[in-house]
Image: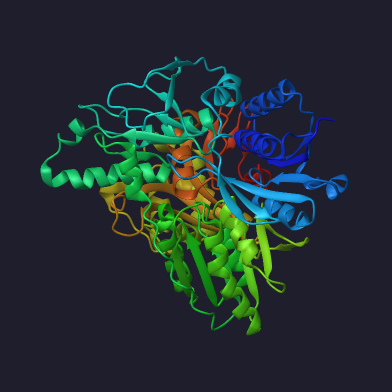
């Protein structure tokens, strides 16, 4: 075996942190005898190809390696001898558990942090001594990113000189990818960037969908820390009246922030843009808790873990921290907790690297709460690995840390607990995501007579649709809808109500299915952003919203498969944008004849009538239990 320590590393879908950690250990310890990776199953073929590229690099260097299930970290044989452990990658829960197990003689434990734009990655050592060290010499090169990310995806690349008016500092290396026309893959001081000058043109406005696609492309090409950078088109902005430009630019910036795109001015160098973003200020000391239970949490993009923590702990006092880019989400969380009667203390950290800042802010709160006999709960889902580890280091014996996995809470010390999701409401999760549901008929409820009238329309669909304006079946349905549910429509709206019978049928059966299983359904309306920001005037229509075992679902109803497929791209974006990565869309057609359902990571397809040989479409409502179970996939 080669000289040097054993290198342990958590391995997620990104290979770069694991390889950078290995380079760090090899340089500082004089070599690596063996590498052991604790990994979850790769999400798909692309991620698996990148993982295999990492293993090929190790084989070229003559470093033996093993891949073990994450649940085994660390195995008993790693309990003695010199070990260097990299906590970057994979689940925060296992990172925290691994730190707890390896705080012993002979072990060195560190985390890699690379969130600061234009700066080299840093190693944050947590054991046996604390310290932060820049990794200029160890930082990954353009060639190494190409080996780990571009080539496994089949991307050809060629290094090219930076173009004129290139905003990156001197020393940045750039590559063109023939399959990605108009973009530049940039590596500067060990961090990758995906750069595209303008996502619009002088005549064409910047589009929200283009920003979403560009952000997704960046993550595919360079991993989670590949920062998409886009200068907006100044000439396009000048097409607007002077009094409109500020609002238009604010709208572009809000869209960019939503998808994690760094939208920059087209003139100044990037250093100036970055300097304006990160002006670190001293954080005020958090006041001591006056009542319990106490909840500590880090606010991030996902709302379900925070909501699950609230339902489980039912805190009287909550301490929330987040980073500047999540300031809106912090504001929504504050409003949510205050609306529930919880006393809230909230603060903004200097950035996602703030491990010790989190520890130092939360430590006195934990100590004082325990001294006063208040139960202390800490949710580890939010924030970055650095922030979650800072929260863990602030805890003391008697405080309870948990992590939401699926629909259950896993405790740090082992064991799990059920979240009382049946006490939840879709409106709460929407509020935590910055939206409210504006319903045309807020007093709707399941009514068998209205359901029977809706069925009459669905059974005679073609006949009723052809005579919609004069059909007595439609007259009866709308009269019952008004009399029984208190929701009447003027005659001029009749033509626009052709989908109402299907929407009510779906709502009725969803409610019947969920009411005994701890779920809640609402019929459709408009999803309206909270507040008075750049996105506030926008709203999005859905045919229903429901909440089931920690997952927020949005409903779309159409008469046939073709109509539903046509709506799918918009629903995919709506579900991800409004609900987040844990949310799902339920797509229901009256009938589905011929052709299978399109593949989608966040949409589930159902139909009242399903033709023979159709794949991927569940029967509504008969297969609801199976269809809703797909939320965990």
| Residue at x-position 57% and y-position 21% | 153
Residue drawn 76% across the image and 50% down it: 107
Identity of the residue drawn at 39% across and 42% down = 498
- The residue most toward the right is 77
Q: Nearer the viewer, residue 321 or 610?
A: 321
In this rendered view, identify the residue nearer to me: 441 or 310: 310
Q: Is residue 307 left or right of residue 258?
A: right
Q: Is residue 581 left or right of residue 500?
A: right
Give residue 382's quadrant in the image.
bottom right
Q: Position of residue 38 (x, y in %)?
A: 75, 41
Count of numbered circles in the view:
0
Image coordinates for residue 397, horizontal then vertical, percent: 72, 72
Q: Position of residue 280 (x, y in %)?
A: 40, 57
Q: Is residue 488 above or below residue 197?
A: below
Q: Please, which colouring scheme is shown?
A: rainbow
* Residue 152 position by quadrant: top right
Seen at 20% across and 27% down, the residue is 202
Position of the N terminus, as image quadrant, is top right
Residue 63: x %, y % from top left: 76, 28
- Can see residue 470? no
Q: Quadrant of the C terminus?
A: top right
| Camera-nearest residue between 601 and 629 | 601
Up the image or down, 265 lies above or below 443; here it is above
Q: Is residue 333 at all visible to an observer of this figure?
A: yes
Which one is in front, 482 or 502?
A: 502
């Amino acid at each position: 075996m080669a000289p040097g320590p054993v290198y342990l590393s958590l391995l997620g879908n990104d290979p770069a942190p694991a390889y950078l950690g290995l380079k760090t250990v090899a340089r500082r310890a004089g070599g690596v005898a063996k590498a052991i990776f604790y990994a979850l199953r790769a999400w798909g073929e692309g991620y698996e190809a990148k993982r295999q590229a990492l293993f090929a690099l190790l084989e070229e260097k003559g470093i033996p390696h093993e891949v073990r299930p994450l649940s085994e970290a660390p195995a008993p044989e790693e309990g003695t001898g010199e070990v260097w452990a990299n906590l970057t990658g994979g689940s925060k829960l296992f990172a925290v558990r691994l730190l707890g197990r390896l705080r012993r003689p002979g072990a060195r434990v560190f985390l890699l942090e690379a969130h600061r734009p234009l700066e080299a990655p840093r190693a944050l050592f947590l054991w046996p001594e604390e310290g932060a060290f820049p990794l200029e010499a160890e930082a990954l090169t353009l060639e190494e990113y190409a080996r780990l990310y571009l080539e496994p995806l089949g991307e050809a690349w060629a290094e090219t000189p930076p173009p004129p008016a290139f905003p990156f500092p001197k020393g940045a290396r750039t590559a063109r990818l023939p399959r990605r026309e108009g973009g530049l893959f940039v590596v500067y001081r060990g961090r990758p960037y995906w750069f595209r000058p303008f996502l619009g043109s002088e005549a064409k406005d910047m589009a929200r969908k283009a920003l979403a696609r560009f952000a997704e492309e960046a993550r595919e090409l360079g991993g989670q820390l590949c920062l998409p950078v886009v200068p907006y088109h100044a000439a396009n902005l000048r097409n607007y009246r002077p009094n409109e430009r500020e609002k238009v630019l604010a709208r572009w910036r809000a869209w960019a922030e939503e998808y994690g795109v760094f939208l920059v001015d087209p003139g100044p160098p990037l250093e100036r843009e970055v300097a304006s973003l990160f002006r670190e200020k001293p954080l005020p000391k958090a006041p001591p808790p006056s009542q319990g239970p106490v909840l500590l949490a880090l606010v991030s993009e996902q709302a379900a873990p925070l909501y699950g923590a609230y339902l489980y702990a039912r805190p009287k006092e909550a301490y929330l921290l987040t980073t500047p880019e999540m300031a809106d989400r912090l504001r929504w969380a504050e409003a949510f907790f205050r609306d529930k009667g919880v006393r809230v203390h909230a603060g903004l950290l200097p950035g996602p690297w703030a491990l010790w800042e989190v520890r130092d802010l939360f430590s006195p709160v934990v100590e004082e709460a325990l001294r006063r006999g208040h139960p202390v709960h800490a949710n580890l889902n939010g924030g970055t690995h650095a922030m979650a580890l800072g929260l863990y280091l602030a805890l003391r014996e008697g405080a309870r840390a948990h992590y939401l996995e699926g629909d259950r809470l896993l405790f740090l010390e082992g064991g799990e607990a059920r979240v009382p999701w049946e006490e939840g409401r879709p409106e709460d999760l929407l509020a935590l995501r910055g939206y409210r549901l504006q319903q045309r008929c807020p007093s709707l409820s399941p009514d068998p007579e209205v359901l029977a009238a809706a069925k009459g329309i669905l059974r005679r669909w073609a006949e009723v649709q052809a005579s919609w304006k004069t059909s007595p079946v439609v007259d009866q349905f709308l009269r019952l809808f008004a009399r029984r549910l208190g929701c009447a429509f003027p005659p001029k709206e009749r033509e626009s109500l052709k989908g109402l019978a299907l929407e009510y049928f779906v709502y009725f059966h969803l409610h019947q299915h969920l009411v005994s299983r701890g779920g809640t359904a609402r019929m459709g309306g408009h999803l309206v952003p909270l507040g008075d920001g750049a996105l506030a005037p926008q709203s999005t229509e859905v045919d229903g919203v429901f909440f089931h075992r920690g997952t927020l679902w949005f409903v779309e109803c159409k008469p046939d498969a073709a109509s539903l497929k046509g709506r799918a791209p918009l629903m995919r974006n709506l579900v991800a944008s409004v609900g987040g990565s844990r949310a799902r869309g339920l797509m229901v057609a009256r009938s589905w004849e011929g052709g299978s359902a399109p593949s989608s990571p966040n949409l589930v397809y159902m139909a009242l009538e399903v033709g023979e040989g159709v794949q991927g479409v569940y029967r509504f409502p008969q297969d609801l239990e199976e269809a809703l179970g797909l939320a965990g996939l």
